[in-house]
Image (cartoon, grey):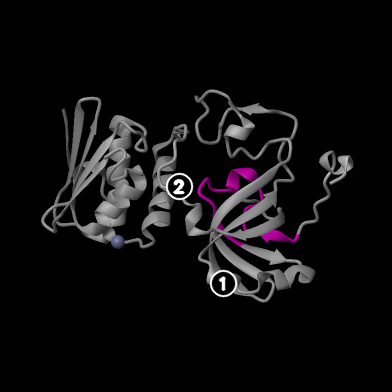
């Protein structure tokens, strides 16, 4: 590499995003459906891409600001403190390179359909890489960029639960609602001091493990007792315990419309 290359790098987009999102405030925080049009000269780079379920999409956020290094993640929560742009996924940064983890839906010729992409229509695409299972860190330490609105917290939990469990079953919907109640009382679910016990069917345990990132050991944060008689989660933190028990019966189509009191009995002590 010559000295010159460390000062200036030329990148040529390989494609462009086609989506319904024309302005920044239309883009959902958890992303949406989009089509990536790969320019014909790069089409061969898609060979066998359909063997992957998930992809990293690297893009150039051409409308984002590039002249600041600290920002408040205001779209999520305007009451949070400033963070450096390298500590966040904020769009604005010196080089507005964005990476979005998406689900690959289908490929036709030079068109790639994906879901979960948070980008505007017309965004240049720089690169596509497969998401490999060995890239997963199940329980990383992260700051809690807690969305101010409960509705946004629910959408993010829903996306996280689907990424983990991969099936939108009744227990997933119920688990997301339980996690939301636990977050109301105790805050961040992925934190060393919070222990989770699930008494219920395997799908509920899997969803709540995915949402709390609680491992069975090192440190032991997750316990599970399999039963079909109960849908219950117990959350323990700083000497307090929160017991959330679903009222019976659990009917998938009713979960979305029921409020917390209709779904659960909650005991906090
Ligand atoms: Zn399930």
Query: In the image, 82: left or right of 58?
Result: left
Determine which residue is flagged by label 2. 137
In the rendered image, residue 130, in percent from the top left (x then y), is placed at: 58, 61
For image coordinates 20% across by 25% down, the residue present is: 239
The quadrant the C terminus occupies is top left
Which is more N-terminal, label 1 or label 2?
1
Q: Quadrant of ligand 1?
A: bottom left
* Callout 1: CB less than 8 Å from ligand 1: no
Q: Label 1: how many residues lie within 10 Å, few (<14), some (14-19) or many (20+)?
A: some
In the rendered image, residue 45, in percent from the top left (x then y), is placed at: 70, 69
Residue 22 is covered by the magenta coloring: yes
Residue situated furthest front in the rendering: 1
Determine which residue is flagged by label 1. 50
Disc 2 is placed on an element classified as: loop
Residue 161 is covered by the magenta coloring: no
**CB atoms at circles 2 and 1 under 8 Å apart?**
no
Span shown in magenta: 14-34
In the rendered image, residue 209, in percent from the top left (x then y), is placed at: 31, 48
Vertical relation: 138 (above or below) 93: below
Residue 39: quadrant of the picture: bottom right
Numbered disc in front, either 2 or 1: 2
Which of 76/215 is in front? 215
In the rendered image, residue 153, in percent from the top left (x then y), is placed at: 41, 41
* Callout 2: CB less than 8 Å from ligand 1: no
For image coordinates 37% across by 38% down, the residue present is: 190
Residue situated furthest left in the rendering: 229
Vertical relation: 108 (above or below) 89: below
Query: In the image, 57: left or right of 145?
Result: right
Q: Would residue 255 be visible to someone looking at this image?
A: no
């Amino acid at each position: 590499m010559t000295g010159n290359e460390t000062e200036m790098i030329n990148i040529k987009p390989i494609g462009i995003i086609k989506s319904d999102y024309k302005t920044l405030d239309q883009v959902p925080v958890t992303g949406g459906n989009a089509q990536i049009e790969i320019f014909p000269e790069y089409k061969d780079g898609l060979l066998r891409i359909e063997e992957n379920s998930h992809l990293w999409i690297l893009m150039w956020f051409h409308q984002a600001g590039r002249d600041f290094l600290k920002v408040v993640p205001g779209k999520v929560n305007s009451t949070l403190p400033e963070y450096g742009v390298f500590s966040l996924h904020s769009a604005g940064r010196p080089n507005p390179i964005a990476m979005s983890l998406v689900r690959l839906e289908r490929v036709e010729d030079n068109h790639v359909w994906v879901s979960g992409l948070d980008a505007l229509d017309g965004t240049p695409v720089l690169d596509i890489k497969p998401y490999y299972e060995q890239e997963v860190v199940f329980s990383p330490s992260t700051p809690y960029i807690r969305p101010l609105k409960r509705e946004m917290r629910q959408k993010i939990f829903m996306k996280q639960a689907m990424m983990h469990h991969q099936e939108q079953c009744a227990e997933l919907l119920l688990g997301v609602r339980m996690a939301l109640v636990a977050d109301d009382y105790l805050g961040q679910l992925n934190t060393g001091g919070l222990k989770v016990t699930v008494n219920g069917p395997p799908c509920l345990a899997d969803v709540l493990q995915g949402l709390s990132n609680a491992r069975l050991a090192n440190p032991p944060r997750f316990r599970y007792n399999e039963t079909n008689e109960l849908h219950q989660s117990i959350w323990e933190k700083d000497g307090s315990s929160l017991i959330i028990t679903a009222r019976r019966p659990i009917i998938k189509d009713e979960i979305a419309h029921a409020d917390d009191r209709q779904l659960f009995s909650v005991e906090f002590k």
